Amino acid sequence: MNNRRLLISHAVPFWRDERFLKALGQAIFLLALALILGYFIRNMLGNLRQQGLGLGFDFLRLTAGFDIGEHLIPYSRSHTYLQAFAVGLLNTALVSGLGILLATLLGVIFGVAQLSGNFLVRSAARGYIELLRNLPLLVLLIFLYSTVFIQFPRVREAIILPGPVYLTNRGVAIPWGTPTDTFSTYLQILGAGLILALLVAVGLSWYGKRSGRPPLTLFWAALTFLLAAATGWLLLPNPPLEANLPAVQGLRLAGGLQLSPEFMALLSGLSIYTSAFIADVVRAGIQSVSRGQVEAAKSLGLTGFQTLRLVVFPQALRVIIPPLTSQYLNLTKNSSLAVAIGYPELFHVSGTVLNQSGRAVEVIALVMAVYLSISLFTSALMNLYNRRVRLVER
Amino acid sequence: MTTTYSKANILPPPSESSTLWGWARKNLFKTWYDTLLTFFILGVLYALIRPFIAWAIGKAQWEVVQVNFRLLMVGQYPAAETWRAWLCLYLLAGILGLSLGVWARQKPWLSAILLLSPVLLVFYPDLSSEARNRLLGLALTALLAFAFGRWRGARLGRAAVILWVLYFPAVLIIIRGGGLLENLAPAVPTSLWGGLMLTFLLTVVGILFSFPLGVLLALGRRSSLPAARWVSITYIEVIRGVPLVTILFMSSVMVPLFLPSGVRPDRVLRAMIGITLFTAAYLAENVRGGLQAIPRGQFEAAHALGLSGFHTMALIILPQALRTVIPVIMGLFIALFKDTSLVATIGLLELLGISRSILAQPQYVSFQREVYLFISLIYWIFSYGMSYASRRLETRLGVGER
C-alpha cells in the first residue's frame, strides 16, 4: 500500500499534480484578490486621512441635529444618530409591512381575475398588469407624489370621502380610535382570546389527524378569536377605543390618523407596482396545478370547495411561496426609493446622516448590512420552507 | 358482441356559435354574476378613461414636451453632434430590418408595419423638415434591410447575430467619439450625455460589461474550487441582498475614495460602474440556471472526447447554457432599462433626471402631469416592445422544448 502511493507520487511530478495545481491556483487567486482589496483600502484610508476623518462607529452616539417628519418612536433633533437610524428602520418596516399586505391583496385579486372566464375581467386584469410591469417604479412613485398626492386641494377645500376621509395637499386623514382607560384590560382579553383560538386550532388539527377528515381549522380558530374579541368589547363597562374623527380646524386638519403625502405616495406606489408582479406569480401558481389533479379529486367525490382547499391550494402554494417571498423582498428593498420623494425611511435618513456627519463609509456599510441581513434572514426562512414542502419523489 | 345505441341517446355534436352574440354570451354574460361583473368593469373603465381623454386632448398643454423635446431625447449633447445619435438609429433600423427579414418569415406585413412606424411620427405637426426627412430615411433603411434579409434568407442568420453583438460597442464608440475618430467625431465628455440617449447607453453598458463578469461569477459559483466558489457566492448574495440605490450611492461616494487621490472618474462613469457591478450578480444567477440545465452527459461526453476542462466549458457547455438563458437575459435587459431611472437619485440627467430638472424651472412647474406622462409612455413603449420581442424570440428559439 505504502509502496504504491510512493510509486504514484514519483510518477507525477508535483508541478503536474492536479491537486497541487488547484491549490496553487486558488492561492494565487486569493492573493490577487487580497492585493486589489488592500490597494483600495489603503487608498481609502489615505483619502480619509486627507479629509481628516477616521473610521469607526463612535459617531453614532453624537447628537443628530436634524428633524425627521414622521417617527414611530419619540425622536427630536437632540437625539443621537443611532436613534435617527432606528426611526428610519421602523419607517421602512412600517411601509414595507403595510405595502406587503396591500400588494398581496391586490395581487391575488388580479391574479385570479386573469383566469376568469369573463373576457372583460380577464383583459382588464391583463391590462393592469402589463401597464404596471413596464413602468419604472421610480417614475410611478414620483408621478403619484407630484401629480396626485400633493395636487389634492388645500385643507379648506378638502375632498371629503364618506368615513370621513379627508384628502388634502397636506396629506390624508382617516378615522382612528383613541384608547380609553379600559384599553389595557381589553388587550388582556384579546390575549386570552388568542390563546383560546390556538387551543381550538391545536385540538382540531389533532382531531383531523386522528379521524382523517381535516376540519376547517383556520376558520374555527378565527371565529373563536373574533367571538372572544366581540364578547370582551360588549362586557367592558365603557368601550376600549373611542372614535377619533378627522376634522378641519382653521387652516389645518385635526384628529384622526394623518398620513403624509410622502407616505401615501410611497405606500400606494409600492403596493400597486408589486401587486402586478404578485398577480403573475399567483396566476402561474394556480395554472401549475394540472387538470388531472382536479379531475381526480372530483372522481374521489370531493366537493368543489374541498377540491380547492385540499388539492389545488396546497399544490399551488408550493409554487407560489418562493417567488412571492422574493417579491416581498423586492418591495422592502424598493422602499429605499422613497429617497426621491422624501419619506424618511432607512435610506433617506442615512443620506441625511451621511451629509451631516460626513461618515460615508460607515453609513453606507451600515445601511447595506441592514438590507443584507433582512434578505439573508428571509432566504434562510425560505430554504427551511422549501425543504419542508419539497416533493418527496421515489 | 356489439352494443347498439338507440338513436335517441346520441347527442348532437356541441355547436360552437361563432356569431358575435354567441361569443358575447359565452365570454361576457354566462351567468348573472358574470353579467354584473361585465357591467361593473365597463363602468369603472368609463369612469377612468373618459376624464383622462378629456384632459389629454383638452386641458393638457403638451407644449412643454415640444419645447424641451431635444433635451428629453439627448440632453445637452452638442447640437452639431446630434448626427451621431441619428447614425446609431440608422444602424439599429438596418440591423432590426435585416433580422426581421431573416427570422420573422411568417407574417411579413406585421414586420413591415413595425419598420414603417417612424413614418407615423412624420405627421406630427411641429417637426423640422430635417427631422422629417431623417425619419423617412430611417423607415427606408429599415425596409431595404428587411427586403435584403428576406431575399437572402437564412444564410444571413449568422451575420445578423454578429451585427447585433457588434452594434452595442459600436454605439458606445460613436457617441463617445475621440481617439482615432478625433477628426471625424470629436470626443464628447460624458457630462453632456443625457435624456433618453443616456438611458439607453447606461442599459447597453450595463449588459455589455456585466456579461463577462456575470459568466465568470456563474462559473465560479459552480466551480469545485472552494476559493472561487465562496468568493462568487459572497459577491452574488451581497449584491442581490441590497437595493440598487445603495449600490449607486456607494459607487458615487466610495469609488473616488478607493482610487488614489486626484483620480476622480466622472459621474456617468461611476454610475456605469455601479450598474455593471449590480447587473453582474443577477446575470450570474441567470447563467447559473442555464448551466444547471445542461445534462451531465454533455460533460461526460466532452471528457470522453478528450477535451480539456476549459474547452469543455467554452465549446460545449457555455454555448448551450447561454442559448437557454437568452429570454431570461432579455428580461434582465428590460429590468435594467427601467432601473436606469434610479441614477436620477445620484444626479444624472437621464430621461427621468432631465425631466425633473426641466420641471424644476419656474415656467414649467405646473406641467408635471404632461412631462411625467410623456416619459412614462416612452418607458412603457420600449419595455413592452422588448418584452414582446423576447416572448417571440422564446418561441422562435424553442427554448424549453426539444
Image (cartoon, rainbow, N blue to C red):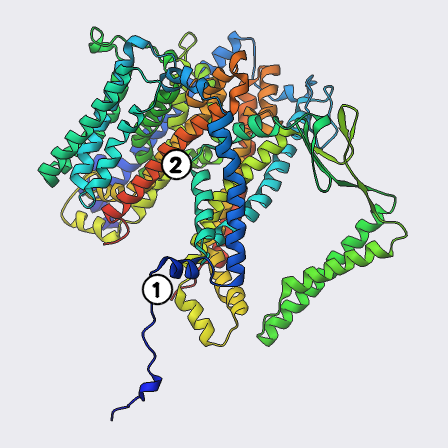
What's the chain of the residue with tag 1? B
Q: Is B157 placed left or right of A385 in the picture?
A: left
Which residue in the protein does label 2 denote? Answer: B282
Residue B312 falls left or right of residue A25: left
Mark 2 vs 1, N-terminal side: 1
Q: Please tell me whether mark 1 sits on a helix, a strand or a loop.
A: loop
Chain hosting mark 2: B
Q: Position of residue A297 (x, y in %)?
A: 46, 72
Instruction: Please tell me how many numbered marks the rendered image carries.
Output: 2
State whether residue A76 is above or below residue A243: above
Query: Percent position (x, y) of residue A51?
Result: 53, 8
Tag 1: residue type?
Ser
Residue B260 horizontal/vertical position (percent): 41, 11
Q: Which mark is residue B17?
A: 1
Instruction: Write down the quadrant of residue B341 in the picture.
Output: top left
The answer to whether one can see residue A376 in this image is no
